[in-house]
Amino acid sequence: MSECYRLNLTRRPRRMRRTASLRALACETEVLPKHLIQPVFVIEGEGAPEPIESMPGIFRLSIADLIRECRELVTLGISGVALFPKLDASLKSDDGREALNPETLVLRAIRAIKAEVPEITVIADLALDPYTVHGHDGLWDAAAQDLANDATVEVLAEMAVLAAEAGVDIVAPSDMMDGRVAAIRAALDGNDFEKTAIMAYSAKFASAYYGPFRDAVGSASAAGTHSLDKRTYQLNPANRREALTEITLDEDEGADILMVKPAGPYLDIIREVREETELPLAAYQVSGEYAQIMAAAERGWLDLERCRDESLLAIRRAGADMILTYFAKAFAAGS
Ligand code: PBG
């Protein structure tokens, strides 16, 4: 080697990458089925599973099929399911009042799962979007062209109590109204549901990655578009400090689990929240993140299993304890 250029080889990091067992010993992050929550879509009736075009491999399930699915998930070691009802259009209204029907689909699904597969953690989303004709997460004030915050919070608190009565383990407000975590906690405690936990969608961004989900629950059909504008309540994707404000508020209001959503494009936020709080942290790998990996894999442009696993690993490495992901079942089956 020439005298003017000498490699400094006192440190050789590649030594620890030489064999599979050395790499295993040096491995810093793990994704296990127990870290994962499978979001599931439930429909009325006893029909066959309905495929969702923009989410290949994901189906809307009848309650009977949902029970079978939950049994499989438990066998695979998955810890939880997050339930999303897809309602018949005839049940949707301007104020989403079906959400407060004690016999509404999601409440029957919760009861059925807790009766048949009690070991799986059941998470119920609290928001009005499956129930409203306009697809917004709360009560729409047409004059103000905005959601009515405080009136929506009252409905969410009632929804939380209904879900707790049905036996849900965790309620997950995904609406982004101000003050809802405190109101939900008070309503739960006031009705002797002090054991029901709250997973707060704390840093939920106004993201374009929710498009396929809106197909799945039909929440954008009234608007006829994916791009329902939720920017008066969901966070601006440009804002990091504001996300931390939401995190602090939800923690102070009594959340048991905090969430960042979407996950992959917001790994910096996950890392910052991890450093900011001692609470368990969830990240939601949303429908569009799933769809983009599936679409590229279908074209043969990406390796499905490796991209899936790497995307989940990155979310765990950023600091998430648990991940809501449409890949949960497939990951657990393949790992
Ligand atoms: C709405 C809700 C959304 C998701 C979960 N709950 C979409 C939205 O805000 O419009 C998105 C999940 C996904 O894209 O997978 N309360």
Image (cartoon, grey):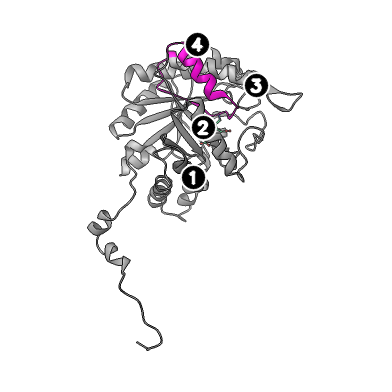
Above or below for 175 versus 325: above
For residue 264, say whether it is visible: no
**Amino acid type assigned to the residue bearing label 2 in the image:** Tyr
Q: Residue furthest bottom?
A: 3
- Work out how far the residue at label 1 is from the one at label 2, CA to CA, in angstroms: 16 Å
Q: Is residue 177 magenta?
A: yes
Amino acid on which disc 4 is placed: Pro
Location of residue 192 with respect to 287 vertically, above or below: above
Q: Which residue is mark 4?
A: 102
Question: Is mark 2 in CB contact (under 8 Å) with mark 4?
Answer: no
Q: In terms of secondary structure, where does tag 3 sit?
A: loop
Left or right: 16 as drawn, with respect to 158: left
Q: Secondary structure at mark 4?
A: loop
Residue holding disc 1: 272
Specify the quadrant of the image occupied by residue 239.
top right
Q: Which mark is residue 171?
A: none
> In the figure, residue 249 lies in which quadrant?
top right
Q: Residue at x 26, y 64 (%)?
A: 18
Q: Secondary structure at mark 1?
A: helix
Q: Earlier in the sequence, mark 4 or mark 1?
A: 4
Say whether marks 1 and 3 touch (CB < 8 Å): no
Residue nearer the viewer, 211 or 32? 32
Q: Amino acid at mark 1?
A: Glu
